[in-house]
Structures are given as structure tokens and as C-alpha cells.
Amino acid sequence: MPRHCDQRPGPGLVPGGTPAPGTGGPAARAGRRGDRGQVALEYIGFVPILLFVALCGIQLGWIAYVHEQADTAARTAARVEARKGSGGAAAGRAAVRGGLTADVAISKSDDAVTATVTIPINAIVPGLSVEPARATAVMPNDDPTGARP
């Protein structure tokens, strides 16, 4: 009589499908219980790392946003001061979105108007010290004599 595949015992089984002695009994199952919860513990240990990486990503985005705001404020302040002769500092502060405070400094020469904007950056990551965002824009002075049509 030929042997079929389904008649062969699997690993740890004797013919008939019962566990072989010492391979699948209660003692073997009890030994496997020691691994229960290991994945949960590994996950709990990894969560702080994931949170730190997420905070670092948010911090980098915030730094980039504040630098963009400083650049926009500097260009606005220099343009308004070059075209109108005054009001550049106020225009630079108004160009910054709410929640940010900009320090705007204007310097003029006969040829150009220079606006320098400094905005402090708040640290989201604990213990991180971030330098303030600084941006400078130079625009040609439209009328160095100050006469307006």
C-alpha cells in the first residue's frame, strides 16, 4: 500500500496527529508564554525615540517658516522705505504673521535702502537653543534726493 503525503506525521507529531512526547505538551506551551508582551515592551521603548524624531521634524519646519517670514519682512520693509522714503519699519513688522515679533532696522544711503529683520525662534525640542532668524534685503533708492512727484 503506497504512502500518501497526508499520512506522514508532521514535526513533533506521531502518526494519528497526536503530539510526540516533549514537543507540544503543556510544558512546551508554558515555555512560550515567557515571550508574551515582548512586542509591547519594545514598542513602549521605541515610542520616545519616535516622539523625539517627530519633534525634531516640527522644529525644522518651524525654523524654516520663521526664516521665510524674516525674509518677507525684510524685502517688504526695504521696498516700502525705498519707494516712499518712510514707513518701512512698520511695513516690515506688518508683513510678519501673527504670533511673531520682528525687530526691523532700516539704513539708507544715496543709492540703496537696507532693511535687516530679526525674529526670535521658539524652541519646541527641550534643551535646544535656536539662534534668531535674521534676513537682510537691499533695494535701490528710487529717489536719493527725497523729492517725490
Image (tube, rainbow, N blue to C red):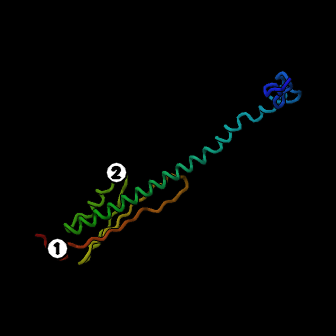
Q: Which residue lies furthest to the top in this view?
A: 16
Q: Would residue 149 appear left or right of 62 to someone viewing this image?
A: left
Task: Measuring from the top left, give residue 120's x and y in whole percent.
Answer: 42, 59
Q: Would residue 57 appear left or right of 80 to someone viewing this image?
A: right
Q: Which of 86 and 3 is in front in this view?
A: 3
Task: Measuring from the top left, give residue 58's x and y in whole percent.
Answer: 48, 51
Residue at the spot of label 1:
146
Q: Are marks 2 and 1 in contact (CB under 8 Å)?
A: no
Query: Is residue 22 visible to us here?
Result: yes
- The 10 Å Cα crowd at callout 1, few under 14, some 14 to 19, many 20 or more, is few
Kindly identify the residue that appears in the image at 20 percent across and 67 percent down. Answer: 83
| Secondary structure of the residue carrying numbered label 1 | loop
Q: In which quarter of the image is the C terminus?
A: bottom left
Q: Which residue lies furthest to the front in this view?
A: 1
Is 56 placed above or below 141 here? above
Task: Measuring from the top left, give residue 29's x and y in whole percent.
Answer: 80, 29
Is 23 placed above or below 132 here? above
Q: Would residue 20 appear left or right of 98 to someone viewing this image?
A: right
Kindly identify the residue that appears in the image at 17 percent across and 76 percent down. Answer: 145
Kindly identify the residue that appears in the image at 86 percent across and 23 percent down. Answer: 1
Residue at the spot of label 2:
98
Amino acid residing under circle 2: Gly
Amino acid residing under circle 1: Gly
Q: Would residue 147 appear left or right of 61 to someone viewing this image?
A: left
Task: Measuring from the top left, give residue 109's x and y in whole percent.
Answer: 26, 77
